[in-house]
Amino acid sequence: MKNDTESQWRRDIIKYRHFYLFISPFFILFAAFSLYPVLFSLFLSFMKWNGLTQWKWVGLGNFTSMLYDDILWRSLWNTLIIGLLYIPPMMILAFIFAQVLNAEWLKLRAFYRAALFLPCVTPMVVIAIVFSLIFSSEKGVLNYAIMGVGHMLPFLHLKPIPWLESESWSKTSVAILVVWRWTGYNMIIMLAGLQGIPMEYYEAAMVDGAGVWERVKSVTMPLMRPTFAFCGLLSLLGTVYMFDEIFVLTNGGPGVSSMNFGLYLFNLSFTDFKFGYASCVAYTVAVAVFFITLAGLRITRQREEAK
Amino acid sequence: MSTSPKMRRMLAMGVFYVVLTAIAFLFLFPFYWLLISAFKTQAQIFTIPPQWVPRPIIFNNFAELYRQTDLFRAFLNSCIISGGNVLLTLFLCSLAGYAFAKYPQARGHGKLFNFILASMMIPGAVTLIPSFLMLVWLHLINTYWAMIIPGSASAFGIFWMRQYVSSNVPDDLVNAARIDGCTEFEIYWRIAVPISKPALAALGIMQLIASWNNLMWAFVVLRTSNMLTLPVVIYLLQGEVRTPFGMLMAGGLMTTLPLILAFLFFQKQFVAGITAGAIKQ
């Protein structure tokens, strides 16, 4: 019997050898740069290693170090604040523009779409440097504009803002850059979601006498919930692992006021060369983010079912 | 004064378009600032009130860039790396995607595919250090391969190609080719690839943008100045004491323009790619 199944196996493999042949180039690279790293990273989480000397087993030592790592907690806190600062305005702006672009009567559609979307394709280095010019506290065009408004409306008592020089504003500057960069991306996803809503739903709502706002509230919003959840998930991951934006605009500064998790992890890995500890931190946060995502998805699903 | 409903409506429309256009211009403003700053001297960049149009227009930044930096070498490096990465990704993903679409009876087919899908959940941060070490052990640090290979085994790419091939390449056509004596690879190369051109274009443009803009990985694996890509060279132009902003902006313009052109040509495919990523959820 055993021989039979074994030869059956072999015959199947030979019969479909092209399948295995065709996926093998992918799988070799996949194994080398995704699979093996995931396992090796887990192994390193229990080691102390700088990449040069022999690694040393430290057991759960890396995990306990995390508890006392002030900068790690600061960077996670900053990640949360930056997320809270940029996600709501970005989502609202993206949703409004998706709605507008979805309207059939809109003129200059290609222009509006390209204007919002172009930021997503540009190299972050270049744009972050342009923003550092715009944000410049004394000679920047943004403060120039603010002072102009302050001149016209003196009762607002507007002062130039130290965008990149002060610990209290650096996160806001990052958030502005991120809104600028990622609104178009979310807009495109929401636009696809909107186009998936059958026209009949709106027509039925109109027959029931629903106004524009009521149609958005009772037809669009509930049906768009999965799309919002997806955009939210992307933004969550994007905030935790964000690198280019912060690395170039503030490099986490001043102090560590705008250091997010992604930048902190990069510094741990490739500035401090704490390969063991960095792996441990990366793993722990990845698992935490995974469970947060899962919980988030479950909540949205439950609310869906409760309806 | 009585305004007719029609007048009021037109007024509302006017306000609507003005607001919309203002926001659109706000989003385009950094590009404008990049463009004009490339044609200004350091002093012109920092005058208050700002010069909205450079007076005089300076071309010196580009000449200085040519004289002082290896930006043209970096441009070439970026082209080789992005081009290589795009081609390799397209080949690997379309070949494996084709296999997953057209041999559903093969043993382990479903498990392997689910495995790839599950791997999309792994964030790059977890694989960063081991991937780097892998390149060290393979003696690929500071080579083009270090930039080309790691990102090319894209799980999303496989998913995307499989979807397209299974709904656009008919089984009858594959079987007919088989009867005509085509080898399996010829069926893939002569039939599936030409049909999949739209999907390949979408995957290619997404990969191109990611690869061209890649800063972090380039920082980690490229070491000598003759190997650096455009984003790294631009980043390193920033000085500790004094940053030559005019030159930086000129270089920035050269880094950005190819992507803007690629985007304008392939806008539709790019949008299709992003949307597909959302629908799979």
Image: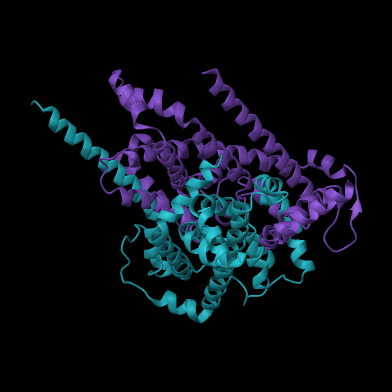
Q: Position of residue A236 (x, y in %)?
A: 59, 40
Residue ranking furthest to the left:
B1
Q: Position of residue A156 (x, y in %)?
A: 37, 35
The quarter of the rendered structure image containing the C terminus of chain B is: top right
The quarter of the rendered structure image containing the N terminus of chain B is: top left
Residue at coordinates 57% horizontally, 27% vertically from top-left? A300
Q: Position of residue A296 (x, y in %)?
A: 61, 30
* Residue A82 seen in this snapshot: no
Report whether B37 appears left or right of A282.
left
* Residue A63 seen in this snapshot: yes
The colouring scheme, among rainbow, by chain, secondary structure or one colour, is by chain
The residue lying toward the viewer, choosing from B238 and A37, is A37
Q: Is residue A137 above or below residue B152?
A: above
Q: How many marks?
A: 0
Name the colour assigned to chain B in the rendering.
cyan
The residue lying toward the viewer, choosing from B167 and B158, is B167
The residue lying toward the viewer, choosing from B168 and A204, is B168
Instruction: Please tell me in which quadrant of the rendered image residue B180 appears.
Output: bottom right
Report whether B10 appears left or right of B260.
left
The residue lying toward the viewer, choosing from A29 and B178, is B178
Instruction: Please tell me in which quadrant of the rendered image residue A249 appears.
Output: bottom right
Chain appearing in purple on the rendered image: A
Residue at coordinates 37% horizontally, 58% vertically from top-left? B48
Report whether A276 appears left or right of A249.
right
Q: Is residue B141 above or below residue A154?
A: below
